Amino acid sequence: MLTADFSASPTEGTANCTTFNFTNGSIGGMPPYSYEWEFGDGANSTTRNTTHIYTTTAPCDEYPEFNVTLTVTDNLGASDFATKTVDVYKLGDANGDCLINMGDATKVERIILGLDPPTPGADCTCDGLINMADVTCIEHKILGG
């Protein structure tokens, strides 16, 4: 019996910044296998393991979730699929409300001061750090820059 499965690492990140790694964990069936990954944003892959960088975020009524589906088909034509969710935030959306405004700048300041835990959208500059440069980046986004 063929059973599709996979893992995602990380499970949350930011658009145009985070590389999501998807690792096939399917078992059973008769090799060789074919793989069809659907990332929920219109992109696909057919490799056993794959990576994906989201260039957009889900609409606000579904934000920040994307459903990722792996369909595996074996040599005998049996197939199975698995679906998991990854969260993809806008760069600068530190408070996770699908908007970029001064509330996000305040959230980044609270993170810097150690008052709040880090959030994926807080790293507005996509440099792996959360600091005052991210506050400036958010302010530029608010002003249309």
Image (spheres, rainbow, N blue to C red):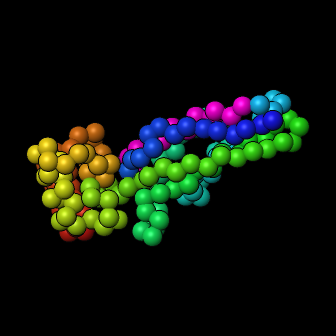
Picture coordinates of residue 87, whole percent (x, y): 44, 52
Q: Quadrant of the C terminus?
A: bottom left
The image shows residue 93, relative to residue 118, as above or below, that is below
Q: Quadrant of the N terminus?
A: top right
Q: Is residue 98 left or right of residue 86?
A: left
Looking at the image, the residue that sits furthest to the right is 76
The image shows residue 97, relative to residue 125, as above or below, that is below
| Residue drawn at the location 20% of the way across and 69% of the way down | 143
Q: Which of the two residues, 73 or 84, is positioned nearer the viewer here?
A: 84
Q: Which of the two residues, 78 or 102, is positioned nearer the viewer here?
A: 78
Inspect this view and state whether residue 38 appears: yes
| Magenta-span inclusion, residue 25 | yes
Picture coordinates of residue 59, whole percent (x, y): 46, 67
Q: Is residue 63 left or right of residue 116?
A: right
Inspect this view and state whether residue 124 appears: no
Picture coordinates of residue 18, whole percent (x, y): 40, 44
Span colored in magenta? 15-27
| Magenta-span inclusion, residue 33 | no
Q: Is residue 111 left or right of residue 88?
A: left
| Residue drawn at the location 69% of the way across and 40% of the way down | 4
**To which quarter of the image does residue 19 belong?**
top left
Q: How many marks?
A: 0
| Residue drawn at the location 19% of the way across and 56% of the way down | 107
**To which quarter of the image does residue 137 belong?**
bottom left
| Magenta-colored segment: predominant secondary structure | loop
Looking at the image, the residue that sits furthest to the left is 113
| Residue drawn at the location 31% of the way across and 52% of the way down | 121
